[in-house]
Amino acid sequence: MSSNPNTLFLRLAGPMQSWGTSSQLQIRRTDECPSKSGVLGIVLCAMGISREDSRRELQHLQQLTMGVRIDRGGDRGWDYHTTGAKFGILSADGKIKNTASTGEPETQLSRRQYLYDASFLVALQGPPLIIESCANALEDPVWPVFLGRKSCVPSEPVFSGLGCFVDLSDALSSLPWQARPGEMERYGHGSTRTLDAYTELPAGSTHSNNARLVYDVPRVFGFHSHGSRWLIADKVTVKVEISNRRPPSVPWSRRPDYQSAQWRAARSGRLVSDDYLCVFCKSEAQEVHHVTYENVGSETNDDLRSLCKVCHDACTMLEYGRGLQLRRIDPSDPSQREEILGQINRILTERRLGRRRELLEKSRLTGRDFFEATPST
Ligand SMILES: [Zn+2]
């Protein structure tokens, strides 16, 4: 890859997406694929730039051309949507309509269209400096990004890499199409697929017969003011890649049997070799922690660490929700030290707060000030 990429890839995939460019009224349709205003909106969200401040940044972003590859078109569906914003809808004579039974302003009804289970590869192409600032934002977004509407959450990371390409068609042909685990039989190894794509003609380039004009280039967000661009319907042929994004299943049958004689022996063996001291803080060890579940049922001394209660709580709390497989948090690994210390501090602070709340509650109930007689912590 060149040191100055001119192309940024975005993966727009999720259970729901909606890319409306035609209406802001009660019936809100989605287009077939992401609009330029929607995609630049994602970039601005990632940069943390509000609608009100978007005008200046949009002047830079408008130098980018955009191409979309339709990896999965998705199914279209309508959602019946109500909004009770209390401002009501107007009747023909200009008065707010109220519900007869409650006297409250009538609920607004709208129908909103979505694409279900669609997946698009989007390429933005232009000056490397602008591409780089967009990439940095998408790798570490300031605000959450969404696929056209706030209810549409991406199911994969949006940032999908950088590259240097002759044009958008070249860029969109460079990445493989991902088959899902259930589709493997249909596509053998080395097979290809031809996909629909829409690429934007750069401003000032020769007009092409099969180009169509679309109005989805935002000038400023917040007002509906859109410029136009020429789009060409294209086809790209790409390799099929078999993806298996599901993590390997955890062999929970290997969960330790804490009642077994084998475990008791392994546990006390480790405590003896640590002189009954916590390997992290050197206070008295009460517990023994697994740094790996690889040898559950026949743990070696090296699979275990003696810990005090607080350090063990910190290690296990750090493990929650991380999808760790056999390897666990290791309190004797220097590179994990800072993180464990941070967690210990959080635990101690929370316990102190809990104690203070408890004392305050006692003071309230008995009318006595417990803090007067309590040494400060
Ligand atoms: Zn400790």
Image: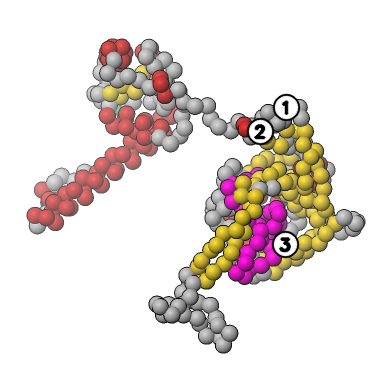
Q: Please give the range of residues in magenta.
A: 11-40
- In the displayed structure, 342 sits above or below 324; it is below
The residue to which callout 1 is attached is 188
Q: Does 4 sit left or right of 111 as displayed?
A: right
Ranked by sequence position, the earlier of labels 3 and 1 is 1
Ranked by sequence position, the earlier of labels 2 and 1 is 2
Please, what secondary structure does the residue beneath circle 1 have? Answer: loop
Whether residue 306 can be seen here: no
Taking the image as four quarters, which one is ligand 1 found in?
top left
Residue with the most extreme bottom position: 93
Residue 17, horizontal then vertical, whole percent = 61, 53
Q: Does 80 sit left or right of 19 as displayed?
A: left
Pointer 3 with pointer 1, Cβ within 8 A: no
Front position among marks 2 and 3: 2
Residue 142, horizontal then vertical, whole percent = 54, 52
How many numbered discs sit on the rendered protein? 3
Nearer the observer, 242 or 45: 242
Front position among marks 3 and 1: 1
Q: Is residue 28 magenta?
A: yes
Residue 136, horizontal then vertical, whole percent = 62, 46
Q: Is mark 3 within 8 Å of ligand 1?
A: no
The residue to which callout 3 is attached is 216
Q: Is residue 114 magenta?
A: no
- In the displayed structure, 259 sits above or below 51; it is above
Q: Residue at x 72, y 30 (%)?
A: 187
Question: Can you tell which mark lies on residue 183?
Answer: 2
